[in-house]
Image (cartoon, rainbow, N blue to C red):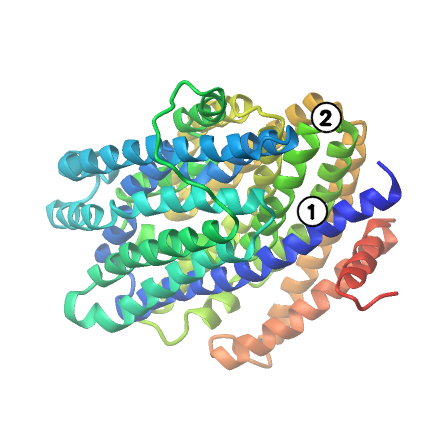
Amino acid sequence: MSAVTTDSMHRRIAAATGIVMLSVLFSRVLGFLREWAVAHQVGSSAVTDAYYAAFTLPDFLNYLIAGASLSVTFIPVFAKYIAEDNEEEGWGVFSTVVTVMGLFVTVLVALGEVYAPHIAAWIAPGFGPAERSRVVFLTRLMLPAQIFFYEGSILSAVQYAKGRFIIPSLAPLVYNGTIITAGVLLTRRIGITAFSVGVLGGSFAGNFLLQVYGAHRAGARFAPNFRVRHPGFWLFLKLSVPIMLALSLSFADDWIIRWFGSYLQPASITWLSYGKTLMRVPLGIVGQAVGVASFPVLAQLYSEKKFEDLNRVLNSTFKALIMALVPISALTIAQSHPLVVLVFSHTRLRAPDLRATAGTLALFSLGMFAWGAQNILARGFYATHDTITPAVVGTVMTALNIPLYWWLAHRAQYLGLALASSIGISAYTIVLFVLLNRRTRNAEQGGLVVFFLKVCAASAVSGAAAYGLARWLEGFMSWHRPLHAMLLLVIVSSVGFALVGLLMKALGVREMEGYVRRALSYAGLHR
């Protein structure tokens, strides 16, 4: 690949990443505000535990039909037809997928509605009759949203494949915004049910109606059909079925935590949900944005058989993720308590709730980079039309880690579950990294490991210094007050990031200056 073409590819990814990152930033902020609204309106109790447990069956159906993975299973199929200059046939496959799979998910939702009481006994076996009844009611209310999520995902996938990222990026904003609005306006009348009403309304407005408009603008052509014998539809199934049948830890972690959490003290599931939501804010902004933006490029390079260029883009993307998430993870761990106090101030959470949530945040943050990295690594496999390897590895790793969840839950309650989550996702990421680099014959595998260790060393030292500085500043300001917590976070984070930069430079991480210079260039600030 020539220097001009390489730079053009990086610019394409950077431009798309900028769009998605801005969207994810607002989405994660709204996602946090959604949890904040629950904490403000309801607090943390057995009622909120039931609300979060009620997401398990809807989430499982979404996973079972690969709805959350359509952008990585349909894009390679569509890209294949574009590469062959046969886009019209690609739209035919799109119509088949929408028709056949849409009918399939509707049937699954109907079965879920009928058997919800029986399934609830498996979802949260530790709940009493009142909590279990609430889980059944909320589950039935939110199940139809999966129809809108699925159809919206395939509509978003074709927009991504056509290089259009703005309208798909608005879906989570509308979704979360609707949940918050419903919660604020209706909680006094119908309690926690208000947020479930918001889930249904938000999925219809943001994930379905808006994406119908976006796909139409992207030139989508739809004609209902049941051409299930078409080679393109079979390629889609070949890529999707392994994901449907697998139980990867990246998807199953929430379900496992809720299952074990149902046996722990009331509010344990809620504390874990709040902590993981906070961890996902920087994770989503960086990891999700980079993964979504880079995947269409990776799929195109594989379809064009440019394997050396595929490795080059993967390596560059992976290094950027390391430089962003590892320092953020270290500083989040160092400042978890003042961070939780700041963001959950003026809610119904009390001091014990804040301490518990801060503990889960710190332990979840240990796996922050792994959560982002597995997203990139899995997409590397998907771009090469291999969904079987991540599915098999994910299922095996999930099975191997369940005893760890059980043991740590008994040893450390909700904190043990957060720690098990981080250990499990880290192990899964390491295995994926080794296997992907073997598959793509990446000659830079050793260099990536050295790069990662250098950034980890700089971040660990910076995190330890930030923790010490925060403890010292406590003598002058109490971070139990929101304003003081904000001031402390600004001071400590500024010092921490500056120290990370200096240490990386001292360790010879030359890529840091290159990424900064490139970012400024793409922003039009550097010549």
Q: CA distance from mark 1 to mark 2?
A: 27 Å
Mark 1 and mark 2 lie on one chain; the one further toward the N terminus is 2
Work out whether residue 441 can be spotted.
Answer: yes
Work out whether residue 407 can be spotted.
Answer: no
Label 1 packing within 10 angstroms: few (<14), some (14-19), many (20+) = many
Q: Amino acid at mark 1?
A: Ile
Residue drawn at x 44%, y 45% is 155
Q: Say which residue label 1 marks.
A: 322
| Image coords of residue 385 (percent x, y) | 58, 25
Q: Say which residue label 2 marks.
A: 305
Residue drawn at x 33%, y 47% is 148
Q: Amino acid at mark 2?
A: Lys
Label 2 packing within 10 angstroms: few (<14), some (14-19), many (20+) = few
Q: Is residue 283 above or below residue 38?
A: above
Of residues 59 and 282, the one nearer the viewer is: 59
| Image coords of residue 199 (percent x, y) | 30, 56
**Which disc number belongs to residue 522?**
none
Of residues 355 and 92, the one nearer the viewer is: 92
Q: Is residue 347 above or below residue 175?
A: below
Q: Quadrant of the C terminus?
A: bottom right
Number of dots carrying numbers: 2
Q: Is residue 136 above or below residue 252?
A: below
480 to the left or right of 52:
right
Foreground label between 1 and 2: 2
Q: Quadrant of residue 154?
A: top left
148 to the left or right of 344:
left
Q: Quadrant of residue 122?
A: top left
